[in-house]
Image (cartoon, helix red, strand yellow):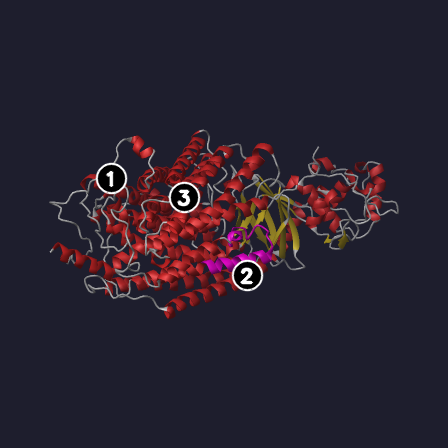
Amino acid sequence: MSHISPTIWQFLVKWLTNFALFPPEASKIAPQMDALFFFMVLVSLIGLTAVVLLVVSFSILYSKKRHPVAVQIEGSTLLEATWTIIPLGLFMVMFVWGALIYFRVYTPPANAMNIYVVGKQWMWKAEHPGGQHEINSLHVPVGHAVQLTLISEDVFHSFSIPAFRVKREAIPGRYTTVWFEATTPGTYHLFCTQYCGTEHSHMIGDVVVLSEEDYRKWLASSTSGNSLAQNGERLFASLSCAACHNARPDARGPSLANVYGSRLALSTGGTVIADDAYLRESILNPSQHITQGYAPIMPTYQGQVSEEGVIALVEYIRHLDSDYRVQQTTNTTDLLPESEGKAAPAAQAPARNGTVKP
Amino acid sequence: MNNNNNTIVDLPDQATARIPQPNFISKENGLMSWLLTGDHKRIAILYLISITFFFFIGGALAGLIRLELLTPQADLMATDTYNKVFTMHGIIMIFLFLVPSVPATLGNFLIPMMIGAKDLALPKVNLLSWYLYMAGGILALYAMMTGGVDTGWTFTTPLSTHYVNTNVITTGFAIFVAGFSSIFTGLNFIVTIHKMRAPGMTWFRLPLFVWAHYAASILMVLGTPVLAIAIVLVMLERAFGIGVFDPAKGGDPLLFQHLFWFYSHPAVYIMILPGMGVISEVISTFSRKRVFGYTAVAFSSVAIAVFGFFVWAHHMFIMGISNYAVLVFSLLTMLVAVPSAIKIFNWAFTLYKGSITFETPMLYAFGFMGLFTIGGMTGVFLGASGTDIHLTETYFIVAHFHFVMVGGMLMAFLAGIHFWWPKITGRMYPEKISQLAAVVTFIGFNLTFFPQFILGVLGMPRRYASYPPEFQVLNVFSTAGATILGVGYLLPVLYLIWSLKYGAIAGNNPWQATGLEWQTQSPPLTENFTVMPVMDHEAYDYEWLESQKTKEVASAG
């Protein structure tokens, strides 16, 4: 190698060793998806080999040189049935197998920990239930089911973690979910895969999978002191939601305690399950979602609450299991909540948190 | 009869042969005689020149994309510029090259001749469709020159309606106009094939090229208006904020995806079906055999057209549409793969007991079969909902549709151009160098796009101007391949132009092919035939062709 300059040599070595052919398998679903992937690769190789073998061998056997006069053949129903039914059968296997994996990727287990992710041009913002907030990175524990609830503030984005084999579009105006269970600690790529404008290729980040212990340390070191639900509570107070949703006998709005996950009767006659999407919609677009027995008087909060604010509110309502706290908030609303230490620690004024747009 | 064992080419004696006069090219002279022509053959040539022009613009943009991706950083151009470049590459290649490529050139030229007609049913509409195409094309170029557009060719809302400040409306309007060109072409083909077949030319005596175009025409006529609607809605939303796609106004951004893909998935079949028609003709001619299972191949075209309309939501598996909708669309996607598999095996078995020669069109056709098989199979990876999650929106999908569109359609287009070049111009292209070009294209193509499958599996997202450094090696391979591919595409332009003056005189039927278009002079008369042909035999009847020749020899004494 004496004739290759060391600089070029180093460059080549670095270049060729830093070279991947297959992504790491770092989630529970990854090996399952790869099994189907390699089955498909195998079928494709067999199919391609069959086509190439047929073309090459017929080209040799029946070239004009060897076979000067063609024998006319109309066709063969049997052969055609064969190459209709065998591919169809294989495709059906792939369809069923693929659908099983698809349902697994998008059906989170009941005990999954939920992290909210907001996509915006051009960053990913993650809101952990403990109030941890990160941008363009996502810390998750190994061996725990983690559900992501995604939404976009502006255009379509897509949250992709190739090492986990999962991906989900973040769409403006609606929540989408995906879940995974990381199996190997490490740092993995996070990409936005839906073209989203100028800095699309910079909307990338890291997914950091931590061991239980490291994860606990990270949680402790990254928290702002308030959980996401507490942030929501503060916002709930500052928007004076409790002025109506206070569960008093004369309340103008329905009580929100234990409302999450329950079936609500609407004034239009239908019923609806109060999930994240419904709660979000009834904050931003209340006149479309009137619970039976109440007047359509709630103003829209569109443009007043950011997506993160809505997420905090939803998280608060999700955890609201009694009206006691709400009524406390009602009282404190009258006395300016910021000065009342319980709902909002003095050190953390709501405005600083950025959940309310001025 | 030609007794050379390596070729079926049978040319007239070059010492005495002349290009027959008059023909459709020499009949009238002057620019206006071309710009105001109603002759389907002249319009086909107008199209051929214009789509080649747009192809090389689109190709130059592809070259810029590959150059940028040579290094992991966005260093050749700003990301905004890169976004405009890939957007324009997509728009030009899809709307201004692939959609009109085979139908508007070869289809226009050949369908009337293949069915024994003098022209298309609506010659003026045919000319109008070329003008619409040019208007759309020039408007698109104007939009590119005056600032470009950076929405991606998919115009995804709300990015296109609210978040970019580039020439979305101009470009959208350009596509809207070019779309009508496609609708008119499709309409013209449908009417012509229904109404203008020569006596004896029954549906099941039509060349498979005509069947494929018929299926593609149905897609053009029924699908393109939906694209037009989607684009008009984007323009209205952008200009007046009507809110159809805006969730803040009660609209639904996913609705745009439904409308757009309702056209744009069938558009894939608009692009590939005519190419499949070319392959059927070429494989039959160069193996001297009727296409194996004619009816199966004919109906598989129709099946692709019908199923093609019911698979659009497979572009949206990860977008939060209902899981059960995903099941249905995944299943239908699997079904649409079957007719393509049928075609591939029928073509392979057409070779069985044939008498095969390997002229350039046949080499391109073989290239098509290999690359389309890969393109089709990788489509199944994306149609299966589970693997789609990982592979969609990455370079896997880029590689997949380039295998189908470039490996499939462009190979078929080149096969067709070489195959019918003697009919169109009256002269042969040079065989050796064109065989070389076919091989160079095949190698360059694989080197360009195969590494992109691996990049996609690794997770490299599409439409990225910069990427993590571990993806560089594969990107360098891809760019190197694109260079070779570029040479493969430039060669035909050079030698085909050369052949216009220096190519050997082809005579009526250099390939000994059976289609009616070969039973008349090359280049044909403006009226195509001196007497109205009567179809008294089946399609691809090589024995009939032999008996015709014996008859001629006998009568000439």
Q: Measuring from the top left, give residue B247's x and y in whole percent.
A: 64, 42
Are the residues under marks 3 and 2 on the same chain? no
Residue linked to disc 1: B497
Q: Is residue B499 left or right of residue B445?
A: left
Q: Is residue B113 left or right of residue A269?
A: left
Q: Measuring from the top left, give residue B92's x and y in whole percent.
A: 41, 39
Q: Residue furthest top?
A: B146
Dividing the image into 4 quarters, which one contains the C terminus of chain B? bottom left
Circles 2 and 1, Cβ within 8 Å, touching? The answer is no
How far apart are the alpha carbons under marks 3 and 2? 39 Å
Residue at x 41%, y 44% (from the top left corner): B185
Badge nearest the viewer, 3 or 1 = 3
Q: Is B281 one of the magenta-colored residues?
A: no
Which circle marks residue A83 in the picture? Answer: none
Q: Main secondary structure of the magenta part?
A: helix
Residue linked to disc 2: A99
Are the residues under marks 2 and 1 on the same chain? no
Residue at x 26%, y 34% (from the top left corner): B28
**Neighbourhood count class around disc 2 (C-alpha, 10 Å): few under 14, some 14–19, many 20 upward:** many
**Neighbourhood count class around disc 3 (C-alpha, 10 Å): few under 14, some 14–19, many 20 upward:** many
For mark 3, name the chain: B
Nearer to the camera, B158 or B201: B201
Badge nearest the viewer, 2 or 1 = 1
Q: Which residues are magenta?
A: B310-336
Q: Measuring from the top left, give residue A163's x and y in whole percent.
A: 52, 54
Which circle marks residue B185 in the picture? Answer: 3
Under mark 3, the amino acid is Thr
Nearer to the camera, A101 or B435: B435
